[in-house]
Image (spheres, helix red, strand yellow):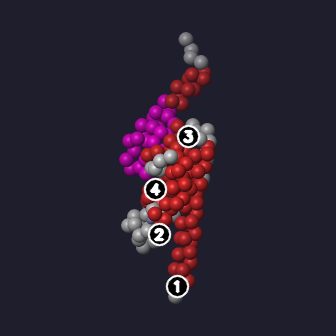
């Protein structure tokens, strides 16, 4: 008996997803931060709304306008947060913790009805397009502000005698 083509395709898809998920869960070296947010690759990949823009990618990869990252690639002398002085400004600090974005974060948390955390961010984003847009909008706004601040600081450094 030959299974229906669509069944085969579904089985293949789910096998593929399981493999990726297995690798995803066991890969210690890379993407630990990303894994913290995107815990279920198949749900993330098969979502029906939302696209991962430049700003969201920064938040998901930890590679972006974060002192931690800028310090690591030699663009900054310290990984300290410019806004609150926290010793390690990474994506986690910026998105979930930094006081500088408390008001903006509070708007998101009012809408989702609780605290925004790496562990629940994916679920909220996948829930519906409105929540995706709210969270993505928050991330974009914060990282745009930080990028402006970084440019301002670079200009000062460049202008220094
Ligand atoms: Zn901070």
Q: Secondary structure at mark 2?
A: loop
Answer yes or no: is residue 146 visible.
yes
- Distance, label 4 to label 2, CA atoms, is 14 Å
Give the CA separation, mark 4 to mark 1: 34 Å
Image quadrant in which the N terminus is located: top right
Query: Mark 4 against mark 1, which lies toward the viewer?
Result: 4
Residue topped by disc 3: 127
Q: Quadrant of ligand 1?
A: bottom left
Return the x and y of residue 36 as percentages of the image width and height.
43, 47
Left or right side of 153 for 93: left
- Foreground mark, 1 or 2? 2
Q: Which mark is residue 160?
A: 1
Q: What residue would you read off at disc 2?
A: 83
Which is nearer the eye, 94 or 74? 94
**129 or 21, nearer to the observer:** 129
> Residue beneath label 4, please?
96
SS at badge 1: loop
Q: Residues within 10 Å of mark 3 (few under 14, many from 20)?
A: few
Q: Are marks 4 and 1 in contact (CB under 8 Å)?
A: no
Q: Is residue 21 magenta?
A: yes
User: Mark 1 CB in 8 Å range of ligand 1?
Assistant: no
Residue name at image x 55 percent, y 45 percent:
125
* Residue stretch rendered in magenta on the structure: 15-42
* Sequence-earlier tag: 4 or 3: 4
Mark 2 lies within 8 Å of ligand 1 (Cβ measured): yes
């Amino acid at each position: 008996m030959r299974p229906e083509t669509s069944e085969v395709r579904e089985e293949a898809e789910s096998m593929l997803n399981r493999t990726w998920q297995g690798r995803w869960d066991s890969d210690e070296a890379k993407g630990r931060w990303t894994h913290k947010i995107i815990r279920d690759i198949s749900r993330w990949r098969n979502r029906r709304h939302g696209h991962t823009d430049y700003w969201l990618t920064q938040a998901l990869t930890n590679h972006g306008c974060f002192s931690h990252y800028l310090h690591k690639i030699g663009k900054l002398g310290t990984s300290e947060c410019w806004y609150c002085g926290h010793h390690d400004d990474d994506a986690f600090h910026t998105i979930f913790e930094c006081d500088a974005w408390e008001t903006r974060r509070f708007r998101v948390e009012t809408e989702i009805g609780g605290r925004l955390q790496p562990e629940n961010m994916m679920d909220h984003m996948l829930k519906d397009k409105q929540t995706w847009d709210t969270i993505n909008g928050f991330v974009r706004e914060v990282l745009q502000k930080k990028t402006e601040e970084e440019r301002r600081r670079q200009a000062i450094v460049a202008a220094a005698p």
